[in-house]
Image: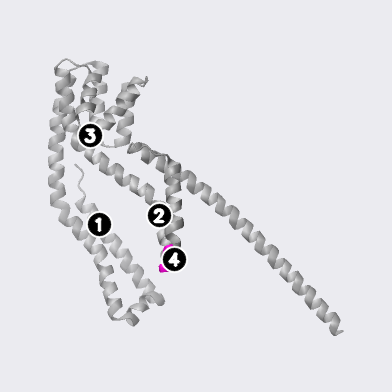
């Protein structure tokens, strides 16, 4: 009888082990397939965003090269951070690495667009002078591409290259406006399109537009100077409480740890974070003046 019970128990253990093994492999198979789908979706979105970002800043790289560089960086850095710190910090670093390329390209595009808009009034004056001297619009663009600094010269060179391979000049200017994404360039494109459609003195129009953009740039500079203190206050109001909390945690770790270990502490911590975010948003709304 005892032998029979032992056989039954051993068989039950084998069956339970088999069921657990099957369940484990099923869960692992599902997780692997879900991981593959998530990775494929991330790779597709990564390629789309990075490809657009590279075209906007006119960088001669392939999205695949950026993806490979990002992946290799994550493989090297994340285990090192995990070994030095802990798994939470390693996960944060991994997320930062994988979203960094899109963020960096957006920053590069913003800076490049700012430089382009700063150079645009001089380019409009140059185009106006070329038109007054008897050159046509394409020749005037060639002078801009030859004599003006980057990135303005690079953008007009791109327009001329597209024009030479058969693209309509208006379409090339629209593509440049999409890359720069600033209203100042839309004014220039509108003036050129209207002049090519119904005629008119394009040289005088561009000269007036150049003066208008210079005055607009001066006003924006004054506004930035006047609102810089408010932006600094918004940044200070957001991050200074974090610094003070860290100091208090070093002074009284037991008292401050209650913020992270009790329900009431989590509630107050959420309220503080929410109020800090609201303060930052409200200050940004006040100091951001659209010209």
Q: Residue 184, labelled with which disc?
A: 3
State which region is magenta: 80-87
Is residue 43 inside the magenta stretch? no
Q: Name the outermost residue toward the right.
A: 1
Mark earlier in primary sequence (3, 4): 4
Q: Residues within 10 Å of mark 2 (few under 14, many from 20)?
A: some
Residue 121 visible here: yes
Q: Are marks 3 and 4 in contact (CB under 8 Å)?
A: no
Q: Upstream in the sequence, badge 3 or badge 1?
A: 3
Up-down: is 271 above or below 177? Answer: below
Query: Quadrant location of residue 190?
Result: top left
Main SS of the magenta part reads helix
Kindly report the distance in space between the C-alpha atoms of the residues bearing marks 4 and 1: 38 Å
| 199 is higher (above) or lower (below) than 66 | above
Residue under label 4, please give it: 82
Indicate which disc residue 17 carries: none
Q: Residues within 10 Å of mark 3 (few under 14, many from 20)?
A: some
The vertical placement of 79 against 72, above or below, is below
Quadrant of the image for the C terminus? top left
Between circles 2 and 1, the one closer to the viewer is 2
Viewer-side residue, 161 vs 8: 161
Residue at left offset 53%, top offset 51%: 38
**Who comes first in sequence, dot 4 or dot 1?**
4
Residue bearing the label numbered 2: 97
Residue 173 appears in the picture as rendered = no
Q: Earlier in the sequence, mark 2 or mark 1?
A: 2
**CA separation in Å, label 3 and label 4:** 48 Å
* Label 4 Cα crowd, 10 Å radius (few <14 / some 14-19 / many 20+): some
Instruction: Please say if 283 is above or below 220.
Output: below
- Is disc 4 placed on a helix, strand or loop? helix
* Residue labelled with disc 1: 282
């Amino acid at each position: 009888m005892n032998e029979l019970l032992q056989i039954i128990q051993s068989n039950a253990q084998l069956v339970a082990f088999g069921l657990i093994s099957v369940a484990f492999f099923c869960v692992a198979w599902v997780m692997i397939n879900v991981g593959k789908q998530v990775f494929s979706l991330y790779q597709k979105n990564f390629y789309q965003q990075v490809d657009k970002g590279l075209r906007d800043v006119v960088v001669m790289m392939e999205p695949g090269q950026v993806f490979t560089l990002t992946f290799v960086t994550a493989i090297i850095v994340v285990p090192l951070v995990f070994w030095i710190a802990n798994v939470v910090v390693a996960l944060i670093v991994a997320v930062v690495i994988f979203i960094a390329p899109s963020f960096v390209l957006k920053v590069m595009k913003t800076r490049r667009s700012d430089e382009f808009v700063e150079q645009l009034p001089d380019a409009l004056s140059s185009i106006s002078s070329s038109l007054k001297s008897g050159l046509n619009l394409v020749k005037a663009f060639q002078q801009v591409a030859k004599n003006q600094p980057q990135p303005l010269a690079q953008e007009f060179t791109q327009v001329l290259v597209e024009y030479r391979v058969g693209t309509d000049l208006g379409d090339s200017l629209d593509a440049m406006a999409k890359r720069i994404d600033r209203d100042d360039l839309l004014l220039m494109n509108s003036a050129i399109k209207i002049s090519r459609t119904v005629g008119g003195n394009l040289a005088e129009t561009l000269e007036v537009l150049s003066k208008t953009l210079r005055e607009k740039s001066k006003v924006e500079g004054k506004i930035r100077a006047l609102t810089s203190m408010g932006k600094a206050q918004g940044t200070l109001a957001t991050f200074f409480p974090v610094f003070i909390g860290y100091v208090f945690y070093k002074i009284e770790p037991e008292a401050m740890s209650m913020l992270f270990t009790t329900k009431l502490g989590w509630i107050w911590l959420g309220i503080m974070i929410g109020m800090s975010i609201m303060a930052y948003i409200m200050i940004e709304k006040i100091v951001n003046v659209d010209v």
